[in-house]
Image: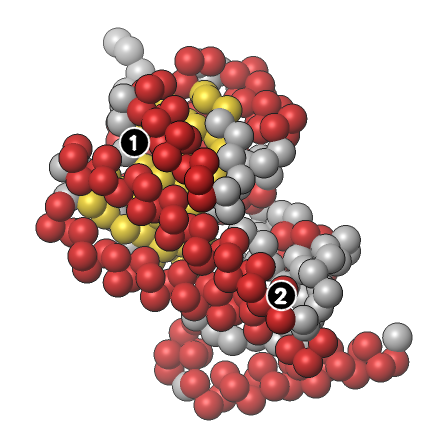
Amino acid sequence: MPAKNSPIEEIFSQQVVWITGASSGIGEALVRGFSAAGAAVVLSARNVPELQRVRDECIAAGAAAKNLLVLPLDVLDYDALPEAVQAVQKAYGRIDLLINNAGTSQRSFCLETELHVYRTLFELNVVAQIALTKAVLPIMVEQGAGHVMVTASVAGKVGVPLRTGYCAAKHAVMGFFDALRTEVAHQGIKVTTIVPGFIRTNIGANALTGTGEPTGVEDADIESGMDVSVCAERILQGIVDGVEEIAVGDGPEMELLELKRQDPVSTFRLLEAMADDIRSKRDNA
């Protein structure tokens, strides 16, 4: 008797999934998860060698080569989006799931952050996600079905120190996609927001300083966070379970989500103390 497929395989084995930010971190882990489930996966990012590495490793793990398409894309190149959408349609004929995962973080206090850094954070984390979503939505409307996802953050729910621009951008992302959900539900299109806490990726080292340069240094809280493959597993299971806001993480930062809802004033005081601690450590370094 042939082995019975898992619920994840049953749902995704016939789907076309397009993932941005697919060359590392959560995006890479999602590529591995969806490809293992038998989905056709489109891998997009700027780093072509890393995209190719992810594809090759998925094939080595048993995924079919025909189900993995490397599609280099700078999500800030808005003029390139229509051609990218056409390339996915040409390869697979449809787009079932778009995961907007490209983005970057920040590690600087407001008073030391140049205005162009805020513009960069909003352009990449918000406007680019909206632009690609708008390019794909008409296809999903024509299909009568589709699913749009975006990687937000606990920082999209709670304002934390060193991340004024990142928090503002992720709050905007949450607002846009929550509102979008209300508008497209009647067309058979689902919208899901992913709310990660500390996940072991290179997000800290790639985060922008006040001048816009990468920090080049990973955060201790990121390094001690959830394994990225576990994160991806929980996201896939959340999709299967129909969860529309998938909070994923296992550290104390996840408690902030509930604390902010239940006791915002205590949350403010807690995070002010956190900022004081950061300043104290900097002064004594």
Rendered position, 235 above or below 163: above
Foreground residue among 30 and 143: 143
Q: Quadrant location of residue 51?
A: top right
Rendered position, 278 above or below 29: below
Q: What is the x, y in percent for residue 61? A: 53, 19
- Name the mark on residue 115: none
Count neighbours of disc 1 (C-alpha within 10 A) and say few if under 14, some if 14 to 19, many if 20 or more: many
The residue most toward the left is 186
The residue most toward the top is 1
- Position of residue 17 in the picture relative to residue 270 (left or right): left
Q: Which residue is mark 2?
A: 116
Count neighbours of disc 2 (C-alpha within 10 A) and say few if under 14, some if 14 to 19, many if 20 or more: few
Disc 1 secondary structure class: loop
Residue in the picture at 62% in, 33% down: 47
Rendered position, 118 above or below 111: above
For badge 1, the amino acid type reads: Ile
Q: Quadrant of the N terminus?
A: top left
For badge 2, the amino acid type reads: His
Q: What is the x, y in percent for residue 80? A: 45, 36
- Name the mark on residue 95: 1
Q: Considering only order in the chain, which callout, 2 or 1, is on the residue closer to the N terminus?
A: 1
